[in-house]
Image (tube, rainbow, N blue to C red):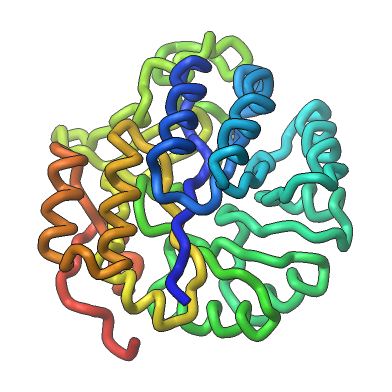
Amino acid sequence: MQPKLTLGPIAYHWAASRKVDFYAQIADEAPIDTVYLGETICSKRAPFVERDLPKIIDRLEAAGKQVVLCSLAEIMLPRERKATADLAELEDIEIEINNAAGLYARGRRSHRIGPFFSAYNEATIQWMESQGATHICLPVELPAPALKIASKAALAESMGVEVMVFGRASLAVSARCYHARAYGRTKDNCRFVCEEHDDGMPLATRDGKPILRINGIQTQSESYLNLLAETENLSGFGVTHFRLMPQAVDMTAVATVFQNKIDGVLDLEEADNRLAQICLGCNFSNGFFHGTAGYRKIQKLAEGV
């Protein structure tokens, strides 16, 4: 069975109208099987997301998309604990948990495990399944041999296995907001400066070389992860879902390229060329998969896979 495409939650503080239009296009045009919704980075943004969720969910489900609601990656405040507890109580929609507080609140009821968890080995995956996990998105920094082992462990427990194949990699989540600090503001008085950067705030080295992106409390890769060349390997590992992360590019076109590559409509060279045109000016990387620095773009396949 071919892996299915999923769309991860929007990591950035896009305007509400933009999000509504974005998901309408995904519903009507994108070859996406499952769409993850919700605020995963900053609880201060959550009200801007939640007010439009009902109509977004209705639009996506009417188009035949499966919808999954996501928890925050970091829990620091009472309101964040309450939001996580409220999410954990939902029974009529699938949820993805990204923090230990969510696991505690959910108990042994079914749920998905998000990429912010450190699910690096078989024992962890088996324990998560024993606690009700039915599906797991593996950490983005796992190299190919580890992905193969982790996929086998999850499949042995009849879990769905998801791997991120496109978008800026999440590298860290902090208690402090560097995005606000860069503008001389505090986290509590940020005035939502993150809205000014719809694809993350560029961060350069002292000699001016692009190195990272800042998104509120999150640090991301400067490059877009691109595992088009590795999709066949991942399919061979038994991976059931490929995750695309929303970026400030035409995501419907991105999804179409990946689907055409999976279906064999496009060969790798043509698919790569089309993706490069869609993401004009952006660098691609796949180093983590090949067991090297994540920012690198490796042409050869990883050994032993």
Could you tell me residue 117's position as x and y percent?
62, 58
Residue toward you, 283 or 110: 110
* Residue in the picture at 26% in, 46% down: 223
Could you tell me residue 221's position as x and y percent?
34, 46
Residue toward you, 252 or 219: 252
In the image: residue 212, left or right of residue 129 = left
Regarding residue 293, the answer to whether it shows in the image is no
In the image: residue 171, left or right of residue 199 = right
- Tell how many labels: 0
Look at the picture and state if 162 lies above or below 215: below
Among the 4 quarters of the image, the one containing residue 87 = top right
Could you tell me residue 2's position as x and y percent?
43, 72
* Residue in the picture at 80% in, 60% down: 110
* Residue in the picture at 21% in, 38% down: 210
In the image: residue 250, left or right of residue 220 = left
Among the 4 quarters of the image, the one containing residue 135 = bottom right
Quadrant of the drawing holding the C terminus: bottom left
Residue toward you, 173 or 160: 160
Regarding residue 102, the answer to whether it shows in the image is yes
Look at the picture and state if 4 lies above or below 157: above
Look at the picture and state if 156 lies above or below 191: below
Could you tell me residue 93's position as x and y percent?
75, 46
* Residue in the picture at 30% in, 50% down: 256
